[in-house]
């Protein structure tokens, strides 16, 4: 089945992080108490308030979206639905090397409860890695892809991560930057093709940032091959520093088929840490999140406009 695709511009503020919030932000391990769960939910509310402030400050509402999880963000999702925002929800278990459903075979019930604009998965898939692992993941992902098309509900957003195999990293003397530049683009293209051939049909591919325009063009060509002409690509921030994210957005925005971005930690991590440490007030943290998100929107729009008129 050919995916429905998504061609409008899309600027996502993602904060569906779960394990990284628990351990990285709060330093908690093991099963959370109700109080700890509430504290994470409150932190995510700060991000949501930053998103709403950015909209009030001029980010185009029709291009904006949030990505937040049900575990800590159910109240946010319900509020965003009531306000007519575009929302995305994750379907994967957090922090696992192998993709599996957060709610097992009951995944459809949870999608239907919130009816998000986009159902998102994060998948680690190296096309030259463990083939049995890849086949197991592909089978589950095809199940989700077919359900979403059959139900004609949420669009399918696929976050593709291609971690290096040991032998691939050895080819570049252990230099992860060299892997990203020299090997990862080809592997990403191959991964997209393998997944499509396995019956996995995303409407939007979330792509790790690329340094070269030609590589971005290759990703779009792979995503749109064989009649998939409406499929879009967006850049993910990968928790990188602001300078690197700006570079990736500028490169991608110039390529037709890259329709936006999903940048989260670069927007909200430092403001939330500042709030937790007492260096920022809540209002200051909200304002900084809103400003950073808005800056990335402005950057992408300007880079796209400049490329169109060049």
Image (spheres, rainbow, N blue to C red):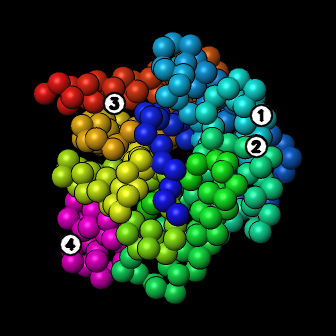
Mark 2 neighbour density, 10 Å: few (under 14) some (14–19) many (20 or more): some
Q: Position of residue 257 (x, y in %)?
A: 33, 44
Q: Which mark is residue 172?
A: 4
**Which span of residues is magenta-colored?**
163-191
Q: Position of residue 28 (x, y in %)?
A: 70, 54
Of callouts 2 and 3, the N-terminal one: 2
Residue to which mark 1 is pinned: 78
Tell me if 58 is positioned left or right of 70 in this view.
left
* Disc 1 + disc 2, Cβ < 8 Å: yes
Is 167 magenta? The answer is yes
For this rendering, which residue is in front, 286 or 14? Answer: 14
Mark 3 neighbour density, 10 Å: few (under 14) some (14–19) many (20 or more): many
Of callouts 1 and 4, the N-terminal one: 1
Residue to which mark 2 is pinned: 114
Reply above or below: 25 against 183.
above
Of callouts 1 and 2, the N-terminal one: 1
Q: For the residues carrying marks 1 and 4, which lies nearer the camera in this image?
A: 1
Mark 1 neighbour density, 10 Å: few (under 14) some (14–19) many (20 or more): some
Helix, strand or loop status at disc 1: helix
Q: CA distance from mark 1 to mark 2?
A: 7 Å
Q: Main secondary structure of the magenta part?
A: helix
Q: CA distance from mark 1 to mark 4?
A: 47 Å
């Amino acid at each position: 089945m050919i995916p429905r695709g998504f061609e409008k511009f899309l600027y996502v503020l993602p904060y569906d992080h779960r394990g990284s919030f628990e351990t990285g932000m709060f330093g908690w391990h093991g099963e959370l108490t109700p109080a700890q769960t509430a504290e994470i939910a409150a932190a995510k509310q700060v991000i949501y308030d930053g998103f709403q402030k950015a909209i009030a400050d001029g980010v185009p509402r029709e291009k904006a979206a949030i990505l937040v999880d049900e575990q800590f963000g159910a109240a946010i999702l319900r509020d965003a639905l009531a306000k007519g925002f575009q929302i995305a929800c994750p379907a994967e278990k957090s922090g696992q090397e192998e993709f599996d459903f957060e709610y097992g075979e009951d995944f459809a019930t949870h999608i239907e409860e919130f009816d998000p604009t986009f159902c998102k998965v994060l998948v680690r898939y190296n096309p030259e890695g463990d083939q049995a692992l890849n086949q197991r993941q592909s089978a589950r992902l095809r199940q989700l892809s077919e359900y979403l098309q059959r139900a004609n509900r949420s669009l399918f957003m696929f976050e593709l991560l291609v971690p290096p195999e040991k032998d691939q990293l050895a080819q570049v003397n252990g230099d992860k930057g060299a892997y990203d530049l020299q090997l990862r683009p080809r592997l990403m293209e191959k991964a997209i093709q393998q997944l499509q051939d396995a019956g996995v049909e995303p409407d939007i591919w979330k792509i790790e940032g690329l340094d070269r325009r030609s590589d971005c063009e290759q990703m779009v060509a792979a995503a749109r091959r064989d009649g998939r002409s409406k499929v879009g690509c967006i850049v993910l921030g990968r928790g990188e520093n602001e300078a690197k994210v700006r570079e990736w957005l500028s490169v991608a925005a110039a390529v037709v088929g890259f329709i936006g971005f999903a940048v989260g930690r670069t927007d909200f991590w430092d403001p939330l840490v500042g709030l937790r440490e007492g260096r920022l007030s809540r209002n200051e943290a909200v304002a900084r999140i809103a400003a950073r998100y808005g800056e990335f929107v402005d950057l992408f729009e300007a880079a796209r406009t400049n490329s169109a008129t060049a």
